């Protein structure tokens, strides 16, 4: 069916040099122009209110945009009033140029100039659809008639701007990619001829993929053709304006830049008609991640997302590059482990080139946290990443061998609750299941004497019952306590791992100990952890925790005998 109904609808340009295809990256940031308040706004089910637009404008200024398309003033009163409000209230910084869109008719152009009266810097953006489909079915104009229409608009703009300083011009052959490239070039060159751009008043020629129709390299070849053949090229700023119908708006814009464009129009998070415009966050951060300063600040990304969602009523997709909620998240154990290793390496080596597996940029550069945003815990998670986070946040350095047991408990909790666990949840599982577990047995007192090695004298309660005493020797204090417990309860095990460290800094900080035991015969392993001001008491607590986890029902005296 498809082959009958559809065919490529773009016009490939004559063969170019394709030299741009050999470039490996974009070495310099383009001029960024945000069209959020025009192309983005016109695509919203409920266009932004005046207050929303003002807030959004301020956010764009804070991000660092120097060119902002603020409205289509002749379209309606809200658009017009918004431009007036910005100018009359002196809300436009001196280094920011506002841009306004107009169709190629005298009346709307006049209204557009009324809107920008008093603006220090403004770009009047003229557009006209140039594609055959538009010429034949919508406008019903021949090529010549269409050129005349474009030139009439261009002339009106030139006349109304007169010698006014600070007003520049932009022309867009709408549906550029669906236009015969040589015809698009002819229209642009005729407009350029009308405007006679100079170094102090350069003109912008903007090439919209109004509907994205081709592979990105085809668009780039169209841009290359324009770049190489435009009149008065030195006084023309070549701009790309891509839409995302095939899902490649950012790639189109990037290849367009390689092919000779110097400027990009787009929106935050790619909002815009249908599938949207180029996402300038992605484009800017793609540059940033390769060491090129885009001149745009995204270090407060969560706040930008919040304001964007509040003002537009749109939602930023969880996997939107650099800005989505999940774009740094690693749930799988292998990813988490690699990230944790990369982070540890970085801590060792100090700041330098970013080389952390799975993370194209440091999440902190876009206002995100490792704890909340990177290593995320569910039933697929692994111990390496979680261990890293527990160490960072709670200062816990588990023995490697304990991690398997710990992960079993975490996965069980995640499965049981059928949800992702926060780091606080993970820590709570550790505290509940491994740390200072004093039921059923609790060593309430322990004294030691140096006699036949070390002798321990301990008092134990079972499930809060009466004290029971035991004495035994061992080759160290923990061993002596362990022998007491073996004699009281008949446990058959040996201690296979012992590890301790201070929790926090300073001589008064508490200690934590970890103990791993293995049951004779069955080979069952159990782990416990204990804290105390005194390291010996912490070790006993860890041993008791491991035993209580292995033996939830200690045998009664008579069974032992
Ligand atoms: O996508 C488009 O063609 C436009 C023009 C008006 C520049 O938004
Ligand atoms: Zn557009």
Image (cartoon, rainbow, N blue to C red):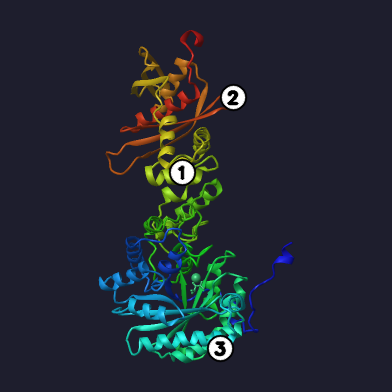
Q: Residue shown at 72%/63% (left/top)?
A: 2
Q: Secondary structure at mark 3?
A: helix
Judging depth in this view, the residue of 254 and 22 nearest the camera is 254
- Where residue 29 sits, quadrant-wise, is bottom left
Query: In the shown orientation, is residue 61 left or right of residue 343?
Result: left
Q: Is residue 15 visible?
A: yes
Above or below 231: residue 392: above
Q: Nearer the viewer, residue 114 or 540?
A: 114
Picture residue at 40% right of the left edge, 74% below the top: 74
- Distance between mark 1 and mark 3 Cα atoms: 60 Å
Where in the figure is residue 476, as x and y percent of width and height?
A: 41, 28
Q: Secondary structure at mark 1?
A: helix
Q: Is residue 228 visible?
A: no
Q: Is residue 414 above or below residue 122?
A: above
Q: Earlier in the sequence, mark 1 or mark 3?
A: 3
Q: Which residue is mark 2?
A: 522
Q: Which residue is mark 3?
A: 229
Give the image quarter of residue 136: bottom right
Q: CA distance from mark 1 to mark 2?
A: 28 Å
Picture coordinates of residue 451, whole percent (x, y)? 37, 22
Separation (CA) of disc 2 from disc 3: 82 Å
Q: Position of residue 187 (x, y in %)?
A: 54, 86
| Mark 1 surroundings: few (<14), some (14-19) or many (≥20) residues within 10 A | many
Of 260 and 145, which appears nearest the observer? 145
Residue designated by label 1: 387
Q: Dot 3, how many residues are within 10 Å of its Cα: few (below 14), some (14-19), or many (20+)? A: some
């Amino acid at each position: 069916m498809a082959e009958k109904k559809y065919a490529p609808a773009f016009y490939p340009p004559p063969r170019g040099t394709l030299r741009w295809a050999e470039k490996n990256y974009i070495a310099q940031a383009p001029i960024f122009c945000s069209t959020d308040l025009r192309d983005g706004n016109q695509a919203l089910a409920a266009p932004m209110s005046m207050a929303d637009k003002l807030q959004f404008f301020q956010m764009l200024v804070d991000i660092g945009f120097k060119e902002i398309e603020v409205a289509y003033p002749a379209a309606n009163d809200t658009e017009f009033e918004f431009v007036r409000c910005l100018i009359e209230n002196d809300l436009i910084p001196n280094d920011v140029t506002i841009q306004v869109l107009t169709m190629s008719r005298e009346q709307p152009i006049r209204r557009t100039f009324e809107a920008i009266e008093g603006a220090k810097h403004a770009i009047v953006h003229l557009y006209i659809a140039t594609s055959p489909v538009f010429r034949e079915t919508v406008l019903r104009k021949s090529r010549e008639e269409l050129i005349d229409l474009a030139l009439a608009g261009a002339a009106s703009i030139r006349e109304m701007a007169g010698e006014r300083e600070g007003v520049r011009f932009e022309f867009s052959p709408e549906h550029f990619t669906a236009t015969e490239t040589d015809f698009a070039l002819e229209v642009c060159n005729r407009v350029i001829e009308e405007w006679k751009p100079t170094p102090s008043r350069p003109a912008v020629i903007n090439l919209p993929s109004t509907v994205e129709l081709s592979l990105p390299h085809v668009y780039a070849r169209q841009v290359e053709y324009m770049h190489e053949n435009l009149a008065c090229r030195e006084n023309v700023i070549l701009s790309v304006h891509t839409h995302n119908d095939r899902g490649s708006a950012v790639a189109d814009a990037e290849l367009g830049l390689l092919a000779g464009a110097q400027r990009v129009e787009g929106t935050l998070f790619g909002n815009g008609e249908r599938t949207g415009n180029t996402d300038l966050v992605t484009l800017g951060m793609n540059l940033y991640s390769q060491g090129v300063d885009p001149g745009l600040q995204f270090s407060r990304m969560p706040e930008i997302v919040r304001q964007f969602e509040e003002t537009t009523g749109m939602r930023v997709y969880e996997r939107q590059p650099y800005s989505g909620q999940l774009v740094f998240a690693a749930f799988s154990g292998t990813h988490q482990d690699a990230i944790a290793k990369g982070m540890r390496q970085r801590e060792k080596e100090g700041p330098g080139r970013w080389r952390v597996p799975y993370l194209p940029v440091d999440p902190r550069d876009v206002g995100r946290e490792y704890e909340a945003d990177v290593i995320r815990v569910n039933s697929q998670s692994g111990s390496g990443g979680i261990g890293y986070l527990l160490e960072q946040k709670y200062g816990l350095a588990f023995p490697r061998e304990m991690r398997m047991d710990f992960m079993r408990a975490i996965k069980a909790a995640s499965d049981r609750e059928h949800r992702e666990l926060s780091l606080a949840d993970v820590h709570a599982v550790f505290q509940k299941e491994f740390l200072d577990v004093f039921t059923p047995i609790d060593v309430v007192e322990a004294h030691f004497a140096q006699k036949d090695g070390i002798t321990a004298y301990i008092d134990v309660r079972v499930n809060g019952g009466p004290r029971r005493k035991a004495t035994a020797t061992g080759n160290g204090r923990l061993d002596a306590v362990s022998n007491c417990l073996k004699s009281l309860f008949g446990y058959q095990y040996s201690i296979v791992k012992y590890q301790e460290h201070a929790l926090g800094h300073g001589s008064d900080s508490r200690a934590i100990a970890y103990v791993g035991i293995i049951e004779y015969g069955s080979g069952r392993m159990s782990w416990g952890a204990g804290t105390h001001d005194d390291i010996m008491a912490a070790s006993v607590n860890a041993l008791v925790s491991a035993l209580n986890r292995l033996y939830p029902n200690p045998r009664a005296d008579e069974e032992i005998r």
